[in-house]
Image (cartoon, rainbow, N blue to C red):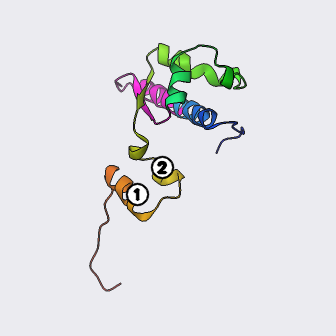
Amino acid sequence: KQTTVAMSTTEAEYLALGEATKEALWIIMLFDEMRVPLQLPISIHEDNNSCILLAEHPVFHLRNKHIDIRHHFIREHILNKQIKLCQISTHTQIADMLTKGLNKIKFQDLRSLAGMTRIRIKGKC
């Protein structure tokens, strides 16, 4: 749950990307503490092109100048090759089945992409 109100879709996606980056960094530290090798960079899938451009190119964007500087730490971790952003189609964004109200067919398609299929157990119940 985001504690900041977003002024645009790009900003909302960018804030969510920041949270995903924090989780990726936590995983990196956890694996490091356990001395388990981890292949870097960690890929984060993003379906918003504007968000990817904002994260990867530290250029002054007039439309996004209101985004607090603390959210731009994502860029540092991209440059350090700890994370990388992978653009995916909106139609294959598996996370949408957890965050959006979808029709039955779209939900079933995303569920299938996630590798979760409906299992029918035969029994009396």
Image quarter of residue 88: top left
**Residue drawn at x 46%, y 47% as measured from the top left:** 95
Residue designated by label 2: 96
Residue closest to the eye, 30 or 119: 119
Residue 103 in the image: above or below residue 50: below
Q: Secondary structure at mark 1?
A: helix
Rendered location of residue 22, percent (x, y): 55, 30
Q: Residue at x 38, y 62 (%)?
A: 105
Whether the magenta-drawn stretch holds residue 111 is answered as no
Residue at 45 percent across and 26 percent down: it is 28
How far, Cα to Cα, is label 1 from label 2?
10 Å
Residue 73: which disc? none
Question: Which region is colored magenta?
Answer: 23-48
Amino acid tagged 1: Lys
Vertical position of residue 99 compared to residue 37: above or below: below
Q: Residue furthest left?
A: 122
Residue 86 image offset from top left, x and y in percent: 40, 29
Image position of 121 with respect to 70: above or below: below
Q: Position of residue 107 (x, y in %)?
A: 41, 58
Q: Position of residue 25 (x, y in %)?
A: 50, 27
Dots 1, 2 in contact, CB < 8 A:
yes
Q: Which residue is mark 1?
A: 106
Q: Quadrant of residue 14?
A: top right
Q: Is residue 38 on the magenta stretch?
A: yes
SS at badge 2: helix
